[in-house]
Image (spheres, helix red, strand yellow):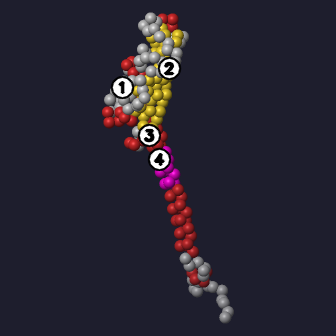
Amino acid sequence: MIRHAPTAMNLTRSSIIPHDRGSVLLIALIFLTILTLAVTTSMRTSTLGLRMAGNEETRVSTMELTQSIVDEVVGNPNNMIVSGDVGYVNCTTNLSGCTANLVTIDTVLLPTAKANNAEVAVKRLAPALTPAPRGINSSADAFFAARFEIDATYDGVADNEGRAGIVQGVLILVPRGAQTN
């Protein structure tokens, strides 16, 4: 059998590329698989980023609420009992083992339903009274300072709000002669 050179008349697709059946389909499937993997990876990364942002927002919100609780406790002079001895611990009602359970938190800041999520302990530190620090824009010789430690924890894990704790020191200025310890 002798083959003749193809002419324009007998030139067909099968005579030019005889083995290309299905190769375009295979290449298209490979590209689609690669594209699907890239999109899936991108979506997982986006979902992970969204979860991380949500967790960070919850963490910051819980920390800010805990700091607000500390600020509320500091702002109420009845929470820090200057006449108490060193080691006197005033707590919220949901803590046991305290000298007193008189610490109150405003219900506007923390509704009654969530009040048990907050635990606050105000502890009187030694020494009983120290000289007031210099630089308080007042006559330091006219005051003593009473030191307190406020330990506040907010646990909203059950409500998907997170858990945060803050320990903060506070000095209360006491006029000389107002208290003898």
Which disc number belongs to residue 155?
Answer: none
Looking at the image, tell me whether mark 2 or mark 1 is earlier in sequence order. Answer: 1
Check if mark 1's residue and mark 3's residue have beta carbons within 8 Å.
no
Which tag is nearer the camera, tag 3 or tag 4? 3
Disc 3 marks a residue whose amino acid type is: Gly
Q: CA distance from mark 4 to mark 2?
A: 42 Å
On screen, residue 166 versus residue 72, left or right, reads right
SS class, disc 4: helix
Residue 138 in sight in this render = no
Image point 47% across, 10% down: which residue? 181
Task: State whether residue 10 is above or below residue 178.
Answer: below
102, above or below 10, in the image: above
Around disc 2, counting alpha carbons within 10 Å, would you say few (fewer than 14), some (14 to 19), or many (20 or more)? some
Q: Residue furthest right?
A: 2
Give residue 81's position: percent from left, percent from top: 41, 18
Front of the two marks 1 and 3: 1
**Nearest the eye: 21 or 74:** 74
The magenta region covers: 42-52
From the top left corner, tell me how far across and down residue 99 is, in percent.
41, 23
- Pointer 1: what residue? 104
Q: Which residue is mark 3?
A: 162
Instruction: Look at mark 2 in the image and give the residue it sits on.
Output: 125
- The three-letter code of the residue at mark 4 reads Arg
The CA span between labels 2 and 1 is: 20 Å
Check the picture and name the quadrant holding the N terminus. bottom right
Residue 46 lies within the magenta run: yes
Which of the two discs, 4 and 2, labels the residue nearer the N terminus?
4
Q: Label 3 to label 4, Cα distance in Å?
A: 14 Å
Q: Which residue is mark 4?
A: 51
